[in-house]
Image (spheres, rainbow, N blue to C red):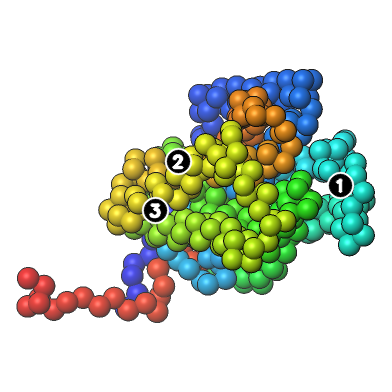
């Protein structure tokens, strides 16, 4: 009934001699320098645009980091095995969320709130109660801080199982810093299942706090830049698309590093087929919720709400960007991911997910920037935002590859990496097989 046990030693044996390629370090360093240069230029010449560019980048990179981890959380909750080879990639992204959280706190505490209109004008009483600087910062600091803490506890439990199991195989060759996670290790047979159950207990809390805190973050960080506009579906649109961007990020990262990490044999076409189906599903959800926000304003004849939409879809230069965003986020991925085969072709799937990533990055910019940029100039804010985006890309590339180079790239200590012992494989009889 049960399939043979999968040998995961290939994901462990190469760790002692593995290091981040020099080309990756160089490119990441260059990206970080470009990001710092763009931030410096923006703060010196267009402070409001620089601050808005940070918000745009935070909504993208912070959303991708935590959204990617949510795939691991979701698989834990539903006891999925198909995507277990991708779990470490999801956790690698998740470890970048505390970094983004720290950068957000710095932004909020050193004057980032200056770009919000409610800081400089009198708000109606019902809005003034909510839009207060201290309350605003406290919501982000407490809510996202709890989410980051829960996520780290989840990742730590996963790492303890994997590092403890890997250390048993490597012996003296295991990196010394692993002991911070494996202190008091009692053996794989005793700890693996217990650590898996601990992750299963934490996962629902992460899911709940993700929905709650990202809802508040979408309203506070993005929607309140236009404080007289609101849409009930906007927060769900954001946290669902953050999960979508996480799926895309995992695809890009795993496809470009699987050979270097020696886990190509685990990331088979059927894994990307399933990941591609999820990506396709959230592509449709993005399109549906994007149109639904417009539809409610239209059939409700809410003229006070239409300004936000018209500015971004009918007024230059944002109308042209709107068409690009819709094409990259919906039309192109929808038409290509309909194909079953294309999701199984690494180069094709990598190309599609890269386009989606660019589309989501531009969508964040398209939502945030028109609330701040009052001139018909798309080039200057785009240069600052893309430049800062290069910095975040370099930071993510350096941080994630440094982490993946020193740990097993697949969850070798998780019982879910092995085939389900209760799964029954039904094969056609010989006479029906031809």
Left or right, residue 182 beside residue 220? left
Residue designated by label 1:
118
Observer-side mark, 3 or 1, equals 1
Residues under labels 3 and 1: Cα distance? 39 Å
Corner quadrant of residue 47 = top right
Q: Secondary structure at mark 1?
A: helix
In the depicted view, which residue is nearer to us: 154 or 389?
389
Query: Which dot, 1 or 2, sits closer to the camera?
Result: 1
Report the front residue among 431 and 67. Answer: 67
Residue at 42%, 63% (x, y): give it: 82
Residue labelled with disc 3: 334
Judge left or right: residue 430 versus residue 303: left
Q: Are marks 3 and 2 in contact (CB under 8 Å)?
A: no
Which callout, 3 or 1, points at the residue further toward the start of the chain? 1
Q: Position of residue 41 (x, y in %)?
A: 73, 20
| CA–CA distance in space, label 3 to label 2 | 12 Å
Quarter the C terminus occupies: bottom left
Mark 2, residues whose alpha carbon is within 10 Å: few (<14), some, or many (≥20)? some
Q: Nearer the viewer, mark 3 or mark 2?
A: 3
10 Å neighbourhood of mark 1: few (<14), some, or many (≥20)?
Answer: many
**395 is higher (above) or lower (below) than 62:** above
| Residue behind mark 2 | 355
């Amino acid at each position: 009934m049960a399939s043979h046990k999968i040998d995961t030693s290939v994901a462990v044996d190469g760790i002692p001699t593995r290091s981040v390629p020099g080309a990756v370090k160089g490119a990441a360093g260059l990206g970080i320098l470009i990001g710092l240069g763009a931030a410096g230029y923006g703060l010196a010449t267009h402070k409001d645009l620089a601050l808005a560019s940070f918000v745009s980048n935070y909504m993208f990179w912070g959303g991708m980091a935590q959204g990617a981890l949510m795939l691991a959380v979701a698989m834990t909750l539903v006891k999925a095995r198909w995507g277990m080879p991708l779990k470490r990639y999801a956790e690698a992204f998740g470890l970048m969320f505390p970094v983004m959280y720290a950068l957000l706190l710095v932004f909020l505490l050193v004057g980032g709130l200056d770009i919000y209109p409610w800081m400089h004008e009198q708000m109606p009483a019902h809005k003034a109660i909510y839009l207060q600087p201290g309350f605003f910062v406290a919501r982000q600091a407490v809510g996202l801080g709890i989410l980051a803490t829960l996520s780290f506890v989840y990742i730590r439990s996963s790492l303890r199982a994997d590092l403890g199991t890997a250390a048993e195989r490597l012996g003296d060759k295991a990196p010394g810093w692993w002991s911070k996670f494996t202190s008091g290790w009692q053996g794989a047979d005793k700890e693996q299942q217990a650590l898996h159950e601990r992750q299963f207990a934490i996962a629902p809390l992460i899911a709940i706090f993700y929905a709650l805190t990202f809802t508040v973050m979408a309203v506070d960080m993005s929607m309140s830049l236009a404080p007289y506009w609101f849409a009930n579906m906007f927060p769900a649109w954001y946290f669902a698309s953050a999960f979508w961007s996480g799926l895309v990020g995992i695809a890009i990262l795993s496809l470009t590093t699987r050979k270097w990490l020696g886990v190509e044999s685990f990331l088979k076409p059927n894994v990307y087929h399933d990941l591609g189906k999820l990506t396709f599903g959230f592509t449709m959800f993005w399109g549906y919720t994007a149109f639904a926000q417009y539809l409610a304003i239209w059939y409700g004849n809410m003229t006070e709400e239409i300004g936000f939409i018209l500015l971004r879809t009918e007024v230059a230069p944002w109308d042209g960007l709107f068409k690009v965003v819709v094409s990259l986020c919906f039309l192109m991925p929808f038409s290509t991911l309909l194909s079953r085969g294309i999701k199984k072709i690494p180069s094709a799937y990598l190309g599609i997910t890269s386009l989606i990533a660019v589309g989501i990055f531009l969508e964040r910019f398209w939502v945030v920037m028109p609330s701040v940029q009052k001139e018909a100039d798309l080039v200057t804010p785009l240069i600052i935002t893309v430049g800062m985006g290069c910095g975040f890309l370099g930071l993510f590339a350096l941080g994630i590859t440094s982490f993946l180079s020193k740990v097993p790239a697949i969850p070798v200590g998780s019982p879910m990496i092995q085939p389900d012992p209760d799964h029954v494989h039904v094969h056609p009889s010989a006479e029906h097989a031809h």
